[in-house]
Each structure stands twice: as C-alpha cells, then as structure tokens.
Image: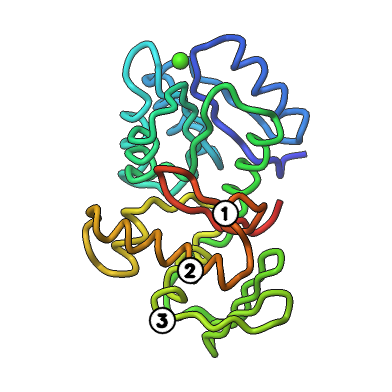
Amino acid sequence: MNNKYKILLVEDEKNIQTFVSALLEANGYKVLIANDCASGKIMYSSHIPDLVILDLGLPDRDGSVLLAYIRQNDLTPIIVLSARSDENEKVKMLDAGANDYVTKPFGTAELLARVRACLRNRRQSSSKTGALTGIFTAKDLEIRYESRRVFIRGEEIKLTQTEYNILTYLSENADKVMTYSAIISAVWRETPNEGNIKRLQVNMANMRKKFGTKPGDITFIINELGVGYRLVADN
Ligand code: CA
C-alpha cells in the first residue's frame, strides 16, 4: 500500500513513541519518528508528512518552535501533545496554528479520533473561499447555507443573526477546537476581551437552549472549558 497517510511523530519519550507509533501503524498509517525539534524539522522537510503529532517538551527546543516553522509555509495539520493541562498553553498553541491538542495521558480512541478529524479537514480545506453553499449535517443538526436555515431532527430552529454566524463558523471548521479569540474575531471582528467572551458564552447558552440540549449532555457542540468550542461532525 502506498496510499497510506504519513504521520510524523515528534516526541522524545521512548514509551510514548512506541505506544503511539504501534497504535497508528495498527490503524493503517505510516509513521516517521523524530526525537527532537532539529530532527523534526529535517524529517518534515524531507518527507512532507500528511499530519504532524508534536510534543511540546522536547530536549533541544520547545515544540512550539517547530510549530511556527511549519506554519510559515504549510497548512499541514498539527496535533500538539502536551503534558501541560494549562488552558492558556492550549489557547496559545491553537492560536499559533495547531489544529488540535491532546493532553497526556490520553486514550487511544481519543487520539485516533483527532487524527481522523484532522486528516478529514485537510481534504476539505482547499474549498474555503466564497459563500458557503449546500447543506451541512452533523448528528441531529442540519444547516442549509443558501437559505440560512437551521434544523434539529428536521424541525426548524430560529436563530438570531449572531447565533447563526457563530454556528456556521464552527461548521466551517468542524471537528476543530476554535478558540474564543478565533470565534470573536470571525464573528464580531473584535479582539477578545472579558466582555465579548461573555457575549459569546451567552450566545452559545441561548443556542443550546434552542437546540434543546442541556450543558453536559452529549451534543454536537463541545465546550472546551477555558479554550473554546468544537462542533463535532462525526464520531
Ligand atoms: Ca517530551
């Protein structure tokens, strides 16, 4: 098989290298391994992988250096692996261009789902220009872009203009965590502050009520606490 996705794993911990590469290979991916930032850079340039899984705590430089290097030229999806559960760190990485993050320790199902989601987005990301057309569906949700109408299990839900704009922005970036700052600058063209983050949260809460889901219910919009929101297209 030469149509396998190539994944570059940049990680210095041997047990995680072994565990993650065995997991990915068992699921049909080809895995390349780099032990530090410098060799990650070389492997990236010589192999052009389809996806990068990047540890932040590397022996030579911080993983964010490699993230910045890749983002200078490429949109290759990057999943950050981090032992840090600090929300600010996650936000910083997402705003610097990481597609997603996984906090150690992580489950195999979680990592595989994030990998699939990133590779799926990669295939769609070339068609982002112009007005949205067609129909978006995720679980019970249906968005008809041309008529700007939203349905839950076939029943129309009346959203405000702002709610609709937030929802379509999340749908355009389905499966990806969108930070408060990304949503606020897309929807209101403002830099985030306490006031507009609150406004965003109120809009999200109102939308949830209209959709008939309580916070904490399993739903298609996941609140990544302290970080942002993710619309889940598929599990
Ligand atoms: Ca490490």
Neighbourhood count class around disc 3 (C-alpha, 10 Å): few under 14, some 14–19, many 20 upward: few
Residue 9 position (above or below residue 48): above
Q: Is residue 167 left or right of residue 184?
A: right
User: Which residue does the image show at 71% across and 51% down from the upper left?
Assistant: 235
User: Which dot marks residue 215?
Assistant: 1
Disc number lying in front (3 or 2): 2
Q: The residue under label 3 is which amino acid type?
A: Gln
Secondary element under disc 2, as helix, strand or loop, is: helix
Neighbourhood count class around disc 1 (C-alpha, 10 Å): few under 14, some 14–19, many 20 upward: few
Q: The residue under label 1 is which amino acid type?
A: Pro
**Quadrant assignment, res 57:** top left
Q: Is residue 150 left or right of residue 100?
A: right
* Residue identified by numbered label 3: 161
Considering the image in quadrants, where does the N terminus appear? top right
In front: 4, or 150? 150
Distance from mark 1 CB to nearest ligand 1 atom below 8 Å: no
Residue 38 in the image: x percent, y percent?
37, 19
User: Which residue does the image show at 62% across and 59% down from the upper left?
Assistant: 220
For marks 3 and 2, the one nearer the N-term is 3
